[in-house]
Image (cartoon, rainbow, N blue to C red):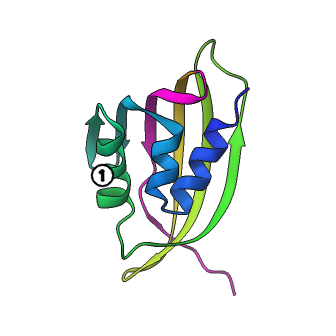
Amino acid sequence: MTTLGPRLARAIAAKDPAAVRALVTPDVDFRGLTPGRAWAGSSADELVDVLFGSWFEDADEVLALLDVTTGAPVEDTERVSYRLALHNGDGDHTAEQQVYYRTDGDRIVHLRVLCSGFRPARHTA
């Protein structure tokens, strides 16, 4: 099992475009699904634009990477899930993403992401 999935989760949580680019091939095949839209791209730049231009914008502060979970691969496809604590002008939120990916050597060439969307955080007293 590779460490690319957890490294990708940490790079996204850090909102680090350079780290994301270093983990994927320049021609990464990307598809994503959020509650209101399907996304697609065929380059590292398009992936970074979606991640940090649409999904996690400047105003979205990542407070913590709450959980990272990997599991046995599905043949040639690895998986990782991660949960983020976030804050923006609308308050505190939690988001989770399920990721399936394939690698070529030490980089991701095929990436599929399913996102829960930003869910209002439940505060306990």
- Residue at horizontal 61 percent and vertical 54 percent from the top: 10
Q: Position of residue 87 (x, y in %)?
A: 48, 77
Q: Residues within 10 Å of mark 1 (few under 14, many from 20)?
A: some
- State the residue at coordinates (28%, 35%): 41
Q: Nearer the viewer, residue 34 or 49?
A: 49
- From what the image shows, is residue 6 above or below residue 77? below
Residue 118 in picture, x, y percent from top left: 43, 63
Q: Could you tell me which secondary element the residue under label 1 belongs to?
A: helix
Q: Is residue 14 above or below residue 9?
A: below
Tell whether 18 sits left or right of 39.
Answer: right
Depicted 25 relative to depicted 66: above or below: above
**In the orientation shown, which residue stands out farthest toward the top?**
75
- Residue 107 lies in the magenta stretch: yes
Measuring 69% from the left and 87% from the top, which residue is drawn there? Answer: 125
Q: Which residue type does callout 1 highlight?
A: Asp
Q: How many marks?
A: 1
The stretch in magenta equals 105-125
Q: Quadrant of residue 104?
A: top right
- Tell me which residue sits at (60%, 21%) in the image: 105
Give the left or right position of residue 10, taking residue 50 as reference.
right
Location of residue 5 in the rendering, given as x and y in whole percent from the top left corner: 62, 39
The quadrant of the image that shows the N terminus is top right
Q: Nearer the viewer, residue 27 or 70?
A: 27
Residue lying furthest bottom in this view? 125
- Residue placed most toward the observer, 110 or 75: 110
| Residue bearing the label numbered 1 | 49
- Return the x and y of residue 54 as percentages of the image width and height: 29, 58
Q: Is residue 11 in the magenta section?
A: no
Q: Quadrant of residue 78?
A: top right
Q: Nearer the viewer, residue 83 or 49?
A: 49
